Image: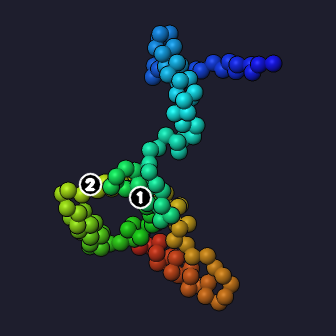
Amino acid sequence: MGKQKENKKLIIKGTDGKISKEDAKKLEKAIRKAQKEGRFPLTAQGTIPYKAMYRNGMCQHDGYSFSKTIAFEDINYELKDNEDKKTVFSKLSDLYNYFTEDTHVEMTYMNTRITPEEIRKALYILGQDDGYDELRDELSEILLDKTNY
């Protein structure tokens, strides 16, 4: 008994929800061909072209092109006074100026506002019933006062 052909219908829509029948047939044919030839990625990771992923998190894309993503989740900048914020900004400018014009460097910053409640939660030091809880409460209040929350 021969293999029964699996008949799955692809649903293809354009940006406005509509696509011509002719374009849908062309697209469906191209997708099936890519799947048959093994060129169709099965996962999201399969769509990202890269040569190597190193243990330190560095990703080699091609030749001499590398990337690395670093996430910082820190509210210390919020606690700084304006003079310290200017110093941080100056140091960031020094970092940008470190690279020569023939070096491609791209930095992306995602600043997100956090609610006063999230700031209070991050700054509050939990008690440990070791005789120092009164000091922890006082330090928490000082930190909260400094941020005006």
Q: Which residue is mark 1?
A: 68
C-alpha span from label 2 to label 1: 13 Å
Q: Earlier in the sequence, mark 2 or mark 1?
A: 1
Label 1 secondary element: loop
Q: Quadrant of residue 89?
A: bottom left
Q: Residues within 10 Å of mark 2 (few under 14, many from 20)?
A: few
Q: Residue furthest right?
A: 1
Q: Quadrant of the N terminus?
A: top right
Q: Which residue is mark 2?
A: 104
Labels 2 and 1 touching (C-beta < 8 A): no
Relative placement, left or right, of 83 versus 139 is left
In the rendered image, residue 91, in percent from the top left (x then y), is placed at 26, 70
Q: Residue furthest front?
A: 1
Residue occupying image coordinates x 49% and y 40%: 47
Residue occupying image coordinates x 61% and y 84%: 133
Residue occupying image coordinates x 46% and y 75%: 143
Mark 2: amino acid: His
Residue occupying image coordinates x 18% and y 57%: 101
> Where 63 falls versus 148 (above or below)?
above
